[in-house]
Amino acid sequence: MAEPRRLSSLADEPAHVAAVEAGIVMRQAPLHAMVTLRGNAGDPVFLSGVREITGCDIPTDPCRAAMTTDHAVLWMGPDEWLVVAPPEAGTDLRQRLRDRLGDDRTAVVDVGDALAIISVGGPRARDLLAKGCTLDLHPRTFRPGHCANTLLAKAQVTLHQVDAAPTFSVFVSRSFAVYLWRWMLDAGLEYGVQVLQD
Amino acid sequence: MFLIECPWCGPRDETEFSYGGEAHIARPVGGGHDMTNAEWGHYVFHRTNPKGLHRERWVHSHGCRRWFNVVRDTVSHEFLLIYKPGEKPDLPALPKSPEPPDGPGR
């Protein structure tokens, strides 16, 4: 007869508990090239120029964004847009737009160093944003391709819903970025936050 | 706290807006070089300050940053009309609401 073994009272408990799926996925977006563009949406030369450089049809409806795989044009006002291009476009983006559009009826300003982009997604992303934002982000009113300038935790931001996951890009002044990042980490704590590194 | 209908962005929270004073105050024609001090004082400082309908300017400062005009009832704080710059629609009929009872300071 085998010698009885001493066993821990917890010996049958599994050694690992499956990680709870994070409700929030946050990522610091790379340093995109960004340009504030002002011009006349009724001017066909302006529209075709922007399409040529970005591949996007300028959104003339309020709070809409146009996207290609690498460019985005966000409505900021009736005569103002934010053009976002991949990091490698650099300051070249402003120059290319200015060369194409001229500067007597348009304004092209490089804001790539002024803004940071925080990407926030995951099944609870809307719940997190709703904690600090008065905008109705329910999919019946805010969908992929929508964008809005609004306040998030009292910081002025531009929200852009990128896909239906949902994933949002949050554009914020770089001086507010650390504050907002930490606010989001804290607000997302109850849902579980996964921070992706590039 | 209430919703204000930005002529471009649609209904947004009051916190996104700033108040800009009375609307439709025309600048002095030709720079006002021959205006008297009294006339300047009137232009700069005098406002109608009505009890009731008031045309005033608001700006969607944390949204599209555009100015627009509203007609607000200064008694009920109700926004009755919202219109873009360059427009000036007639004043709407004042909705019939019971006069609030007189209280201290009124």
Image: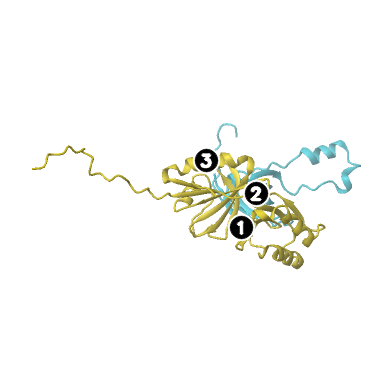
Chain colours: A yellow, B cyan
Provide the residue designation for mark 3: A183
Q: Where is the N terminus of chain A found, in terms of image quarters?
A: top left
Which residue is painted at 51% across and 54% down in the image? A137
Same chain? Circles 3 and 2: no
In the displayed image of the protein, which residue is found farthest to the left? A1
Q: Quadrant of residue B40?
A: top right
Count numbered badges in the picture: 3
> Which-is-in-front pick, marks 3 and 2?
3
Q: Residue at x 67, y 52 (%)?
A: A33
Q: Amino acid at mark 2?
A: His
Kindly indicate whether the residues beneath marks 1 and 2 are on one polypeptide chain: no
Indicate the secondary structure of the residue bearing disc 2: loop
The spot of residue A151 in percent (x, y) is: 58, 46
Q: Which residue is mark 1?
A: A63
Q: Which mark is residue B60?
A: 2
How would you rate the neighbour count of disc 3 (Cα within 10 Å): few for under 14, some for 14-19, many for 20 or more? some
Chain where mark 1 sits = A
